[in-house]
Amino acid sequence: MRVQITETILRDAHQSLIATRMSTEDMKDALQLLDKIGYFSLECWGGATFDSCVRFLNEDPWERLRFIRKNVKNTKLQMLLRGQNLLGYKHYADDVVEYFVQKSVANGIDIIRIFDALNDSRNLETAMRACKKEGGHAQGAICYTISPVHTFEQYLKDAKYLVEAGADSICIKDMAGLLLPYTAYDLVKVLKEHVKLPIQVHTHYTAGTASMTYIKAAEAGADILDCALSPFSQGTSQPPTESIVAALRGTPYDTGLVLADINEISQIFRAVREKYIKSGLLNPKVMGVDINTLIYQVPGGMLSNLVNQMKEAGKEDQLQDVLKEVPRVREDFGYPPLVTPTSQIVGTQSVMNVISGERYKMVPKESKDLVAGKYGKTPVAIKQEIIDKILKGEKPITHRPADDIAPALEETRREMKEYLEQEEDVLTYAMFPKVAKDFFEHRRAVKYKLDKDLTDMEDKVHPV
């Protein structure tokens, strides 16, 4: 059975290695060549790319998508969407989610990979329904993690929920690189036996086992594998496209892709890679193997955040205590998979527990919201003693969190009307109001050659 490849060079590869800083300029010379390879899809949008475009690169993410679509006419374009969180870090109103999906498809996206940090299918339903309505391919993702409750039976149950919600395919999303080769084989086998949809596998090379995981997943019947061109592969990124293509050549899983053609594109990204190594943005440390991922079962990005938090607090000597505290907090919080935003919530709470010397003496709002059900249903119910300690009498919600959010699209439109140049701007503002405002002001200043400090927007006056 032929295995297909999703290429991540335009999204997750650089999100994982250079904090999503690859610009459209870096990509442009490769786009038409990528389109000729024969990939299943090009993952090029969503995840952190949207935030990074407006916050750091002064790029319009919608313009980037349209530019890629203009240059990639034959290959499906794919994005990553955090369910009801869209591309932000909280739940948004249903009308905002529906409009975002509509505009994503209208601007060129074919496949939307939709996941929820808690694997709570209720948080995926609006986005899945909207994707189907717009004629997009809705790929339901299961966040893979390890815990006493994350069994094959549970993952199969999650997959069946996604099928019921209208998924066109299923992705095993291993965001931390925890999926080991023989486990991958068994998990893919179970899903293929009970779910009659294509199965895609996504992992990271952090622990050094990802290529072996892909070989076993292919042998078990995986239909599609996420890979990254070699200059931005391995480390905290995906396995190299070229290596996987070469390894499967001449087998029943042959991808049919031509290695020489792929290598031609890799030459372009080797130059891009060198640029980011020289700038210091690509740290060689993230290119190596970090076995701590398997020992502590935390994503590489979460591990580096914990190190930074302890450094800032002057408590580096207590890092091991924090790493031991993470699984305890995770158990207290109902065993959430560690992916944005739950990885940040569990990590920060673990740091606070250790630094304060008393568990849950300091509790951030995000921890309270997680325990209160405002992110969704945790994989297992949180113990009453933890609820009492953290919520102090407040009763957790059991319904879908977004049911409490009033329609927000028209109010958002009114709030940002002075910046509106295209319909999509409403959605950029809805997700990132402060960052979007700064970006819109910069865009206007560049377009009309205005000095922001001299502009009187109220009276529409600017000195000549």
Image: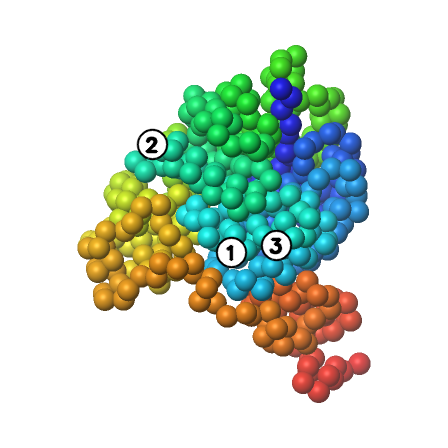
Residue 4 can be seen, yes or no: yes
Residue 106 at what x, y percent from top left? Answer: 72, 54
Give the number of the mark in front: 1 or 3: 3
Q: Amino acid at mark 3?
A: Ala
Residue 150 at what x, y percent from top left? Answer: 36, 36
Circle 2: is it few (<14), some (14-19), or many (20+) Cα within 10 Å?
A: few
Numbered disc 3: secondary structure = helix
Give the number of the mark in front: 2 or 3: 3
Which of the two discs, 1 and 3, labels the residue nearer the N terminus? 1
Residue 371, located in which quarter of the rendered image? bottom left
Q: CA distance from mark 1 to mark 3?
A: 12 Å
Instruction: Give the color scheme: rainbow, by chain, secondary structure or one colour.
Output: rainbow
Q: Amino acid at mark 1?
A: Gln
Residue 369 at what x, y percent from top left? Answer: 36, 60
> Which residue is tagged 1?
84
Q: Disc number at residue 72?
A: none
Residue 233 can be seen, yes or no: no
The residue depicted at 44 percent of the width and 67 percent of the height is 404
Which of the two discs, 1 and 2, labels the residue nearer the N terminus? 1
278 left or right of 447 in image: left
> Which residue is tagged 2?
295
85 left or right of 230 in image: left
Q: Disc number at residue 130?
A: 3
